[in-house]
Amino acid sequence: MRDYIISVWSWMDPLYYHFTRLTFPAKEGNIFRVRLTKYKGRNFVLSDGTEINKNDLLLKIHLHNIRLLKEFKSLTSELKKAKLIYNYVQRSMPEIDLYIQNHPKSNKIKGVIGITILNKGCERLGFEVFDLSHPVYRWFKQIAFLPIGILSSRNVSVSHILKNHKPSYLFMSTKKLSNMYRK
């Protein structure tokens, strides 16, 4: 059943990619798909002093989930899966910096934003993690991440995912991104 769902998802993924206006950064191996977005949440101040306010321009990053799910098929250890994601993100971040540098609106982009249930280890990658404050949005995101959680873990129940994997914002300022990942 899992393989069938993944193959259907693979078939539908190009449609999702098209309708969400996502783009790939230049490098083939990059695990992210990205798009510019105007931030609509509550205000945040990052550790380097960067203020993230409503309507600020941010680069939204999306993990290429179907690609990860296909690679997870050969992995049984949750630790190996986590290391795989960590290494992909670490290798992809310099391309995110380059994408922002070369973007026509680069001087207006304040940072990078993502929403994830995989927030362990994010600080080591340079991200700052913040809770989603609006309960309805948090619930919606938790439900949206549920299929990914179920498909990526063989022996994890729905209740375990809902209880132990809360969605969070990930932020990184463009200044910090450049300091950590500029080639």
Image (spheres, rainbow, N blue to C red):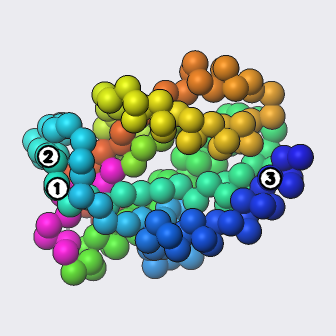
Question: Residue 74: in sight, yes or no?
Answer: no
Label 1 amino acid? Asp
Q: Is residue 16 left or right of residue 135?
A: right
Q: Which residue is mark 3?
A: 5
Name the kind of residue labelled 2 in the image. Asn
Category of crowding for the residue at label 3, using alpha-carbon neighbours closer than 10 angstroms: few (below 14), some (14–19), many (at least 20): few
Contact between labelled residues 3 and 2, with CB atoms less than 8 Å apart: no
CB within 8 Å, label 1 to label 2? yes
Q: Which residue is mark 1?
A: 56
Residue 117 against residue 98 in the figure, above or below? above
Q: Which residues are magenta?
A: 105-113
Which of the two residues, 121 or 156, is positioned nearer the viewer here? 156
Q: Which residue is mark 2?
A: 53
Looking at the image, residue 45 sits to the left or right of residue 130; the answer is left
Q: Disc 1 versus disc 3: distance between alpha carbons?
A: 37 Å
The x, y position of residue 69, in whole percent, is 71, 52
